[in-house]
Image (cartoon, rainbow, N blue to C red):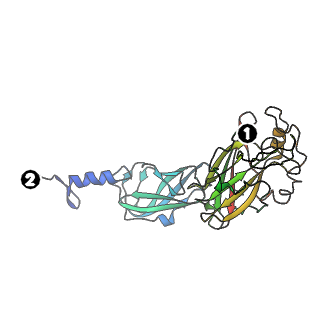
Amino acid sequence: MERKKFIRNSIGLVSVAAIADACKKSDTGSSSASVTALTCASSVFSSTPVSGTAFSGTGTVPYTGGNGAAYSAGSAIASTGVTGLTATLVAGTLANGTGNIVYTITGTPASSGTANFAISFGGQSCSMAVTVNAASGSCVVAPVETEGPYPYPGGEINNPLNISNIKGDRTGVAFSLTIKLVNTNASCAALTGYRVDIWHCDRRGYYSGYANQPGVDGTLSYVGSTWLRGYQTTDASGNVTFLTIFPGWYTSRACHIHVEIYNASNQVVKITQLAFPQAIGDAVAVLTSPQYNGTVNPTTNATDSVFSDSIAQNQLLTLSGSIAAGYTSTHVIGIAV
């Protein structure tokens, strides 16, 4: 028969194996630290994280029944709900009675909403929750705009257009566009499983899929072509990303992208358009290699028939990059669902 080893402490004989198991289960790195209760609901945070922005702060969790023991730093705990953050216990010494333990919280939250951390300390467990705010200006309902010209005949979903790289054989200044969908009726929580259709003209102002288009190169037909259009379904963070080129322009319209958004029941929940910063659009338009229209667009965002009364309502893209390296943009579209 196996003989178990015991040691004596203040409350009597304790199995050595039991102590070893307790050490393995401890998140604190100390088997002696204990509390009778953790109150995660009363946690206090040094500041509020913002979606898509790097964060560094602290979360303080009250406890009762501390035994005065010292404890070491813990392991990083990944957030759930809103992902992208981690919480790590800061080393310290318990009070005899009531006090607080402190966690450092770092990372970049993937969306707005609530980030939850499953913490375990001193023999007790609870869930610490921190609210993540939406980025400034993003938690607003995007304006509704006309569908505009040239959605693909029969609709994007009925064609082989479930693609992220929509460049096809078109050339121009590289452009990567990430669209993030959020629910303005739920603290801008990410909208998952929504279909996002986009389309735009090429560097010379023509659309794929249509005949008899007047433009700088004369009247042209691109029936059967599918370049510079496609759709994606939003992921768990509400994002879709398209690889494309910087659009050109055509008479009477500022540089723009068409967007249609559908829910899981294939119902349209938003039709809108996205505008480009005037100075960057003008700089791209005058390029001769690759050849854009070669001149500044006479129709500006301020005089455009679509954007003139709504561009301040979160329709203007924010761009990073350069003509040589290409541009990138992440744009949040708010929908009330």
Can you name the residue that lies furthest to the left here? 1
Can you name the residue that lies furthest to the right here? 298
The amino acid type of the residue labelled 2 equals Met
Q: Nearer the viewer, residue 334 or 150?
A: 150
The residues tagged by marks 2 and 1 sit, at their Cα atoms, a distance apart of: 79 Å
Left-right relation of 153 to 119:
right
Q: Which residue is mark 1?
A: 170
Look at the numbered disc 2 and give the secondary structure of its residue. loop
Image disc number at residue 178: none
| Point 79% across, 61% down: residue | 146
- Label 2: how many residues lie within 10 Å, few (<14), some (14-19) or many (20+)? few
| Point 81% across, 35% down: residue | 291
The amino acid type of the residue labelled 1 equals Arg
Q: Nearer the viewer, residue 118 or 110?
A: 110
Mark 2 vs 1: CB contact within 8 A: no
Look at the numbered disc 1 and give the secondary structure of its residue. loop
Total label count?
2
Q: Is residue 140 visible?
A: no
Q: Nearer the viewer, residue 278 or 62?
A: 278
Above or below residue 261? Residue 294 is above
Image disc number at residue 1: 2
Give the quadrant of residue 282.
Answer: top right
Q: Is residue 317 visible?
A: yes
Percent across and percent down for residue 243 are: 67, 43
Left-right relation of 135 to 25:
right
- Label 1: how many residues lie within 10 Å, few (<14), some (14-19) or many (20+)? few
